[in-house]
Amino acid sequence: MDGSPQRTLLITLTGRDRPGVTSRLFTTLAEFPVTVADVEQVVIRGRLVLGVLVAYSDGADIGQVWAAAERVAGDLDMEVELSTGRDKRLPRRRGRLHVTVLGAPLKPAAMAGISGRIAAGGANIDRIERLAHYPVTCIELDVSGADPDALRADLAKEAAEQQVDVAVQHAGLHRRAKRLIVMDVDSTLIQGEVIELLAEHAGCLDEVAKVTEAAMRGELDFEGSLRERVALLAGLDAGAIDDVRREVQLASGARTMVRTLKRLDYKFAIVSGGFTQVTDALVDDLGIDYSAANTLEIENGKLTGRVVGPVIDRAGKAAALERFAREAGVPVSQTVAIGDGANDLDMLQAAGLGVAYNAKPVVRQAADTAVNVPYLDTILFLLGISREEIEAADAADPR
């Protein structure tokens, strides 16, 4: 068929899902001089909706195709809707985006607001799919005809109003090709801040916590604030580090996230303003590929109140991401960075996808997207990995 306008027939079957419906319809259509222009299928609670758009020449007897489709529907005890038209836009649509919506719970008003913003921007929702029903509900929309930056800004406002998380990403192979994950540690991969756990042992928690909060909000220079906090730990017995290692708790979903991505041959890295005396144990426990962190100086079994070597700060985290990407042979555009504090900003902006995870406002505003639920594995949904795929992989390999 040439590029001139073609006649089309849209066949939509609706009814109880069972094996063989799609095969039966296409086997019947194979008897006629038509080509397949588009196909969409969805199953919701055992009910199938199958739409097939076929194109045909002006001389074709489409009445026979119409009658054959009705016979298939009758044999399968399904409803059928048929409509004809002309379409010269059969080539694949351009400018496609993935819009991922996370809610706990996800209410109809949120979906109404998001879909309304998409429509107001002149874009179209081509497909909707559920990626997860727990620990959050995740719905992914394929959208065409939208300006990415404008849509991202509009949906960010709607997400704030509806108290849901929304991510906007370009569709295409590059989304699945993000092969290096670089993650902050304190309050991201693990719950809480290691330096505060150490400060609790040293009896200076309140002083350290105040400086930590100011630094995370971007109100203080990170290196200066780190040295100030570490100085408060001077004289602490090094054995307290062993206690803190045992106290550290991973974020909910952390093991699932790392395990799933490693199965998909992703490389995984951590970069921390915390301390190697704790992060090295996480590397061994989770099988992490690359890591960078600060090192506490210890003399005669006591913390000196100093760190060894250059501080891993905001710029240091971005540099580490670029170094890890080179070592992994992965373009920086195919990396994902995840963090929560101001010292993560350069890293988030350098990565192909920057995710603010339960982050401070300044970080949420600067990142590509934000996740504000306490489940680290929900980030898998942003990569197009569904809860069902995660569970299937765990069932096949329960290690």
Image: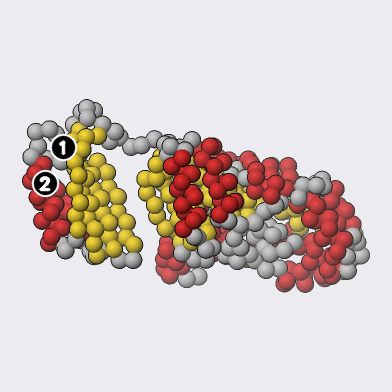
Q: CA distance from mark 2 to mark 1?
A: 10 Å
The residue identified by callout 1 is 56
- Label 2 CA crowd tier, 10 Å (few <14, some 14–19, many 20+): many
Where is 193 relative to 172, above or below? Answer: below
Which residue is at 29% across, 63% downward? Answer: 47
Residue 365: % across, % down: 65, 45
The answer to whether marks 2 and 1 mark residues whose Cβ atoms lie closer than 8 Å is: yes
Asked if residue 222 lies left or right of residue 17, the reply is right
Q: Nearer the viewer, residue 30 or 71?
A: 71
Where is 19 relative to 66, above or below? Answer: below
Q: Amino acid at mark 2?
A: Val
- Label 1 CA crowd tier, 10 Å (few <14, some 14–19, many 20+): many
Residue 15: % across, % down: 23, 62
Q: Amino acid at mark 1?
A: Tyr
Tell me the element at label 2.
helix
Q: Nearer the viewer, residue 261 or 119?
A: 119
The residue identified by callout 2 is 65
